[in-house]
Image: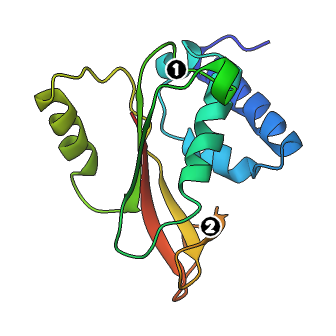
């Protein structure tokens, strides 16, 4: 049985990975998505809501032409979306990785009078075809190729 916060976090991510695999979502994506998330941010959330956040962002990232950003704003609910964010509105961004993205987005939300309760911000290496269709989320950051790039996926 996990005893430390890090053990609890590791156990939660392992359970999420197993659930993701049963749904056909790559385990590596779940692992990378929550890799830098704080224990406190994960512990306060329901497992299905955490999985729902990953799965929804993966769907949002499916189509993204080169050099563009995909932005989705939603207030998910269990009856409609199969997951929730405890009544909060979620902003999802998928774009090329570059400096100061999280700062820029959180400052824009703050300037608009919105409070940010959670930030999950993995930088993922992905493979896309020439039309911008997501082919694969890679777990090996050293992978190279003309169709491989580093992306910033933000869930706020």
Which residue lies at the image location 62% right of the left edge and 67% below the top edge?
A: 140
Q: Position of residue 49 (x, y in %)?
A: 63, 24
Residue under pointer 1: 85
Answer with left or right where residue 109 lies relative to residue 145: left
**Spatial CA span between label 1 and label 2:** 30 Å
Q: Which mark is residue 123?
A: none
Which callout, 1 or 2, points at the residue further toward the start of the chain?
1
Relative to 109, is 78 above or below? above
Q: Residue furthest right?
A: 22
Relative to 133, is 107 above or below? above
Q: Which mark is residue 140?
A: 2
Residue 55 vs residue 43, the one in the foreground: 55
Answer with left or right where residue 53 lies relative to residue 20: left
Question: Where's the N terminus, which quadrant?
Answer: top right
Asked which secondary structure carries label 2, the reply is loop
Task: Classify mark 1: residues with Cα within 10 Å, few (<14), some (14-19) or many (20+).
Answer: some
Q: Mark 1 or 2, which is nearer the eye? A: 1
Q: Position of residue 46 (x, y in %)?
A: 65, 16
Asked which secondary structure carries label 1, the reply is loop
- Which quadrant of the figure has residue 78? top right
Q: Position of residue 8 (x, y in %)?
A: 66, 18
Residue 1 vs residue 149, the one in the foreground: 149
């Amino acid at each position: 049985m996990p005893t430390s916060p890090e053990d609890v976090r590791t156990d939660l991510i392992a359970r999420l990975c197993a659930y993701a695999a049963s749904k056909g979502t790559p385990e590596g994506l779940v692992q990378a998505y929550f890799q830098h998330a704080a224990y406190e941010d994960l512990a306060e959330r329901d497992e299905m809501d955490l999985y729902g956040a990953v799965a929804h962002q993966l769907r949002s990232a499916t189509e993204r032409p080169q050099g563009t950003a995909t932005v989705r704003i939603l207030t998910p609910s269990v009856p409609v979306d199969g997951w929730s964010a405890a009544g909060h509105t979620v902003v999802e961004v998928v774009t090329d990785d570059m400096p100061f993205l999280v700062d820029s987005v959180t400052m824009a939300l703050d300037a608009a009078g919105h409070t940010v309760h959670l930030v999950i911000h993995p930088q993922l290496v992905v493979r896309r075809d020439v039309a911008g269709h997501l082919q694969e989320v890679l777990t090996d950051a050293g992978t190279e190729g003309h169709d491989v790039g580093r992306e910033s996926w933000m869930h706020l």
